[in-house]
């Protein structure tokens, strides 16, 4: 056993001292007939087994959620719900280190990134706990006619079904749970089988704080658990984060009982670099945008669209930056890039690199697993850069979900924007320039729900996170997310003839 794997084994023992993670239903641990396995991508070894929910288990969770909603949650004052959510958040805050280790081991992301994700999840939940009693929850008086008292009120759906991916498990769970609970719903959340541990743990940490049944977590596969949840006729709203291909299926399932959907889907986000850009900061931003979290990010800047006057210098700097990443054990503080999260993801990246090469793109960096024997047991892949990329190529159009960057060039503003927008996706876009006229024009012209100027990130709960085109429907985050978890009702009270 190498020093790395030894450190890992110890971390497993400390972080997952239970041999099995059960589901969480009706405010308590819930055992299923059999289980799934979640694997550590650093050493490709089992971390622990996880409950495998199937139809009957999903039905039980939905029933428990309705009971929690009808009996307790819907009867509570918003202030009381807010206090309970803050108590739960306090409990999560006391477990940041444990949750960080769990996330680190389950996803393979560097520990500092995992910590940032856990803290981001807590911050998101705090934001929504504070919105429980904010004026954004108020209906309004509508002064339409003098003989009419007309007003609106917001009502939760009741029980909502939520599905999350493996790349930011605890954070995406918080994006879903925060607004759903703050709007007054009970929820049944299905995490990804590849990284379910932190979501299960935060549910467990709600024990004795949130009323039984208000928060249920049902790990399982997409076909056995996810599909059952989305087509369940007692699930009144479906919110999904994941790939566009699965999002399409989720929409079809939800349509079977006319449940509204929120979809946060994939991306192929451009970073457009204008000739006046400060390359020192823009190269860092663009590289961070594709190599952070090993490129397993929905809004990764996977397409650098660079003005031809600076393309050579940009490419040289970008390649140098790509080659400067330190691949290693996510628990080592010097590591700046961990492994891909699974063998499946590794194979996908490898395949796309082969496709790009066959299509005629030029490999400028990476394109292989690292030589280091210390890394041989994990799913590591070197930061990769392709030049001479045509926008019709699959490498320019399809989401790789790994550390693979393409660099393309443009001449005029119109050409650059057209190239950036020439994709089915529309999640995020980056702009590199010091000119305010370019900033505002490009921010308006780029077809994307989130635009970053001279940086990559952050994502704060105060702002909506929206996918344009095939990147989604509706949004997570912001006060706007509350609207996806509540329905406006209009009340007309006849004030005519007040005589008695
Ligand atoms: P995925 O679509 O394979 O799976 C997402 C979730 O859906 C998992 O929990 C999975 O078990 C479940 N699922 C699979 N089949 C299902 C079905 N038929 N019915 C219901 N649920 C089903 O995605 P992934 O590989 O876990 O995550 C990566 C994808 O997620 C990428 O495309 C990425 O861009 C996207 N993503 C988007 C955002 C965003 O905010 N837009 C954020 C993170 C990830």
Image (tube, grey):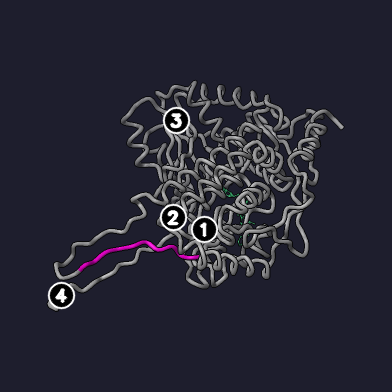
Residue matched to label 2 = 474
Name the secondary structure under disc 3.
strand
Q: Is residue 461 visible?
A: yes
Query: Which of the two discs, 3 and 2, sits closer to the camera?
Result: 2
Residues rendered magenta in the picture: 149-158
Query: From mark 4 to mark 2, how far is it between C-alphas?
Result: 40 Å
Query: Which percent across, then down, holds residue 499?
Result: 12, 77
Q: Quadrant of the N terminus?
A: top right
Residue at the spot 76% in from the left edge and 58% down from the top edge: 35
Q: How far apart are marks 1 and 2 (CA)?
A: 9 Å
Mark 1 vs ligand 1: CB under 8 Å? no
Dot 3: within a 10 Å radius of its alpha carbon, few (fewer than 14), some, or many (20 or more) residues? many
Give the percent coordinates (x, y) of residue 172.
Answer: 56, 48
Q: Which of marks 4 and 2 is in front?
A: 4
37 left or right of 166 in image: right
Give the mark nearer the N terminus: 4 vs 3: 3
Q: Residue 273 carries which label?
A: 3
Q: How far apart are marks 3 and 2 (CA)?
A: 29 Å
Queried on whether the Cβ of the residue with tag 2 lies below 8 angstroms from ligand 1, the answer reads no
| Mark 1 surroundings within 10 Å by alpha-carbon count, few (fewer than 14), some (14 through 19), many (20 or more) | many
Kindly report the secondary structure that dominates the magenta region of the rendered protein: strand
Judging by the rendered image, the residue that carries numbered circle 4 is: 496
């Amino acid at each position: 056993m190498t020093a790395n794997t030894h450190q890992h084994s110890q971390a497993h023992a400390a972080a997952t001292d239970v041999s099995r993670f059960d589901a969480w239903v009706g405010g308590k641990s819930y055992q299923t007939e059999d289980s799934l396995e979640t694997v550590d991508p650093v050493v490709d070894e089992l971390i622990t087994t996880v409950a495998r929910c199937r139809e009957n288990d999903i039905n039980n969770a939905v029933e428990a959620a309705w009971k929690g909603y009808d009996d307790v949650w819907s009867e509570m004052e918003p202030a009381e719900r807010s206090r309970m959510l803050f108590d739960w958040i306090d409990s999560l805050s006391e477990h940041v280190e444990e949750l960080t280790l769990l996330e680190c081991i389950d996803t393979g992301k560097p520990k500092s990134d995992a910590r940032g994700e856990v803290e981001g999840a807590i911050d998101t939940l705090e934001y929504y706990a504070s919105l429980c009693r904010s004026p954004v929850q108020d209906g309004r008086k509508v002064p339409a006619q003098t003989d009419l008292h007309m007003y609106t009120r917001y009502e939760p759906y009741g029980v909502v079904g939520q599905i999350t991916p493996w790349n930011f498990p605890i954070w995406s769970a918080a994006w879903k749970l925060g607004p759903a609970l703050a709007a007054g719903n009970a929820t049944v959340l299905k995490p990804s089988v590849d990284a379910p541990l932190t979501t299960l743990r935060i549910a467990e940490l709600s024990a004795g704080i949130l009323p039984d049944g208000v928060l249920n977590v049902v790990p399982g596969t997409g076909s056995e658990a996810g599909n059952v949840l989305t087509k369940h006729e007692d699930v009144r709203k479906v919110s999904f984060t994941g790939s566009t291909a699965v999002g399409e299926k989720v929409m079809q399932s939800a349509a079977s009982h006319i449940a509204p959907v929120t979809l946060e889907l994939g991306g192929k986000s451009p970073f457009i670099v204008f000739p006046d850009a400060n390359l020192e900061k823009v190269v860092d931003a663009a590289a961070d945008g594709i190599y952070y979290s090993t490129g397993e990010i929905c809004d990764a800047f996977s397409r650098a669209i660079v003005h031809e006057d600076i393309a050579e210098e940009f490419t040289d700097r970008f390649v140098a930056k790509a080659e400067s990443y330190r691949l290693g054990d996510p628990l080592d503080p010097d590591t700046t890039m961990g492994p891909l999260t699974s063998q499946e993801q590794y194979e996908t990246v490898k395949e796309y690199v082969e496709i790009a090469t066959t299509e005629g793109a030029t490999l400028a960096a990476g394109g292989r697993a690292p030589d280091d024997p210390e890394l041989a047991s994990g799913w590591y892949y070197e930061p990769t850069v392709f030049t001479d990329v045509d926008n019709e190529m699959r490498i320019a159009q399809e989401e790789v979900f790994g550390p693979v960057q393409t660099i393309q060039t443009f001449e005029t503003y119109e050409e650059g924007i057209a190239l950036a927008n020439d994709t089915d996706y529309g999640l995020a876009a980056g702009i590199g320039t010091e000119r305010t006229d370019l900033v505002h024009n490009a921010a308006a012209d780029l077809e994307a729900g989130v635009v970053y100027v001279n940086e990559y990130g952050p994502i704060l709960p105060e702002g909506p996170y929206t996918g344009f085109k095939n990147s989604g429907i509706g949004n997570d985050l912001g006060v706007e997310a509350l609207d996806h978890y509540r329905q406006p009702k209009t009340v007309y009270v006849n004030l005519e003839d007040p005589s008695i």
